[in-house]
Amino acid sequence: MNRDIDRLRDMALFAEVAREGTFVKASETLGVPVSTLSRRISEFEKGINVKLFHRSTRKTTLTEVGARYYQQIDDILQQVRHVNDELDSETSTPGGQLRVSMPADFGAYLADVHFDELRAAYPSITYEFFLTSDEVDLMVGRYDVSILIGDPPSASRLIARRIGTVHRHLYSAPEYLERHRVPAKPEQLNSHTCLFPPPVESGGGWLMRNGPEVIHVNPSPLLMINSQAVIRQLVMHGIGIGQLSRSYAAALVRTGSLVAVLPEWELDPQSLYVLTASRLLPARVRAFVDFLAETFRGLT
């Protein structure tokens, strides 16, 4: 492998000398001392057992074999330069299609709150979002990035970057609380209509924290569903008390459509991760990851 790489480098040096016509000019173009360039070409000729140049004190010309060889490899080297130029563009300018897998709730939140900002920041990127809570194998190459809520598997080969924390609270519509007694402590949730997503915490119900105080409550749910969007919609219609992430409910709390229930109590927070198959990222992937990290920096 190393020998092949050295051969490619020597081919490029030879082509530059052939193109410039002298070792001096090629040396200036390449930024390589003339003595080093001359030695490398001599070693290259010995390695392939072919004389490529006629050398004299006044000029350097290609041999007949050298001229044919130059014609044959010049197109190859031009293609290599073209590929490298595309790679440089790929790694320096965000553009092209970005394929991301993410939970449906995160996708809905991103589209609703941050997508316009993302699109404005990187107008040359187009997007394919695949909404799933299942772990996606980025190693097979179908997707560039995966968003994960919760800790990644310890045996995962993927590169995980933690970008924030998802804080979860209980919310209800004002109309529901007008019809029912507002719970003053977690135990009183057992007498309320509750909505939350499966799988529930160990033992069922909600594990709630208020500073050092931790309590487990297990109300009988009217509905369990793996969609914050559905829970939010039902809660807004006054059906009951539901579990939502703080960021997902924030806009509705500001408008008064929802109110926090037991606001000093929080459900167990979850970490938010971005997963990639490698640390070497194309510009579009790096831009997206950095955007999310900056956007969710406050979720700690």
Image (spheres, rainbow, N blue to C red):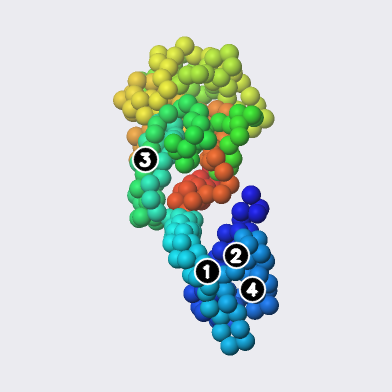
Q: Residues within 10 Å of mark 4 (few under 14, many from 20)?
A: many
Q: Nearer the viewer, mark 4 or mark 3?
A: 4
Q: Earlier in the sequence, mark 2 or mark 4?
A: 4
What is the spatial separation of the Cα atoms under label 3 and label 2, in whole angstroms?
53 Å
What is the spatial separation of the Cα atoms under label 3 and label 1, in whole angstroms?
50 Å
Q: Which residue is mark 1?
A: 66
For the residues bearing labels 3 and 2, Cβ distance under 8 angstroms: no
Residue 97 at x, y percent in the picture: 38, 47
Q: Earlier in the sequence, mark 3 or mark 2?
A: 2
Three-letter code for the amino acid on which mark 4 is drawn? Leu
Q: Earlier in the sequence, mark 1 or mark 4?
A: 4
- Hey, which quadrant is residue 277 in on the image? top right
Residue 268 at x, y percent in the picture: 58, 28
Which residue in the rendered view is the most extreme toward the top? 220
Residue at the location (61% across, 56% down)? 5
**On residue 50, which mark appears?**
2
Name the quarter where the C terminus is drawn: top right
Residue at the location (52% across, 35% down)? 139
Residue 233 at x, y percent in the picture: 33, 27
Residue 118's place in the image compared with 30, above or below, is above
Closer to the camera, 245 or 175? 245
Residue at the location (63% across, 70% down)? 41
State the SS at label 2.
Answer: loop
Residue 48's place in the image compared with 143, above or below, is below
Three-letter code for the amino acid on which mark 1 is drawn? Gly
Q: Residues within 10 Å of mark 3 (few under 14, many from 20)?
A: few
Q: Which residue is mark 3?
A: 128
Q: Residues within 10 Å of mark 2 (few under 14, many from 20)?
A: few
What is the spatial separation of the Cα atoms under label 2 and label 4, in whole angstroms?
17 Å
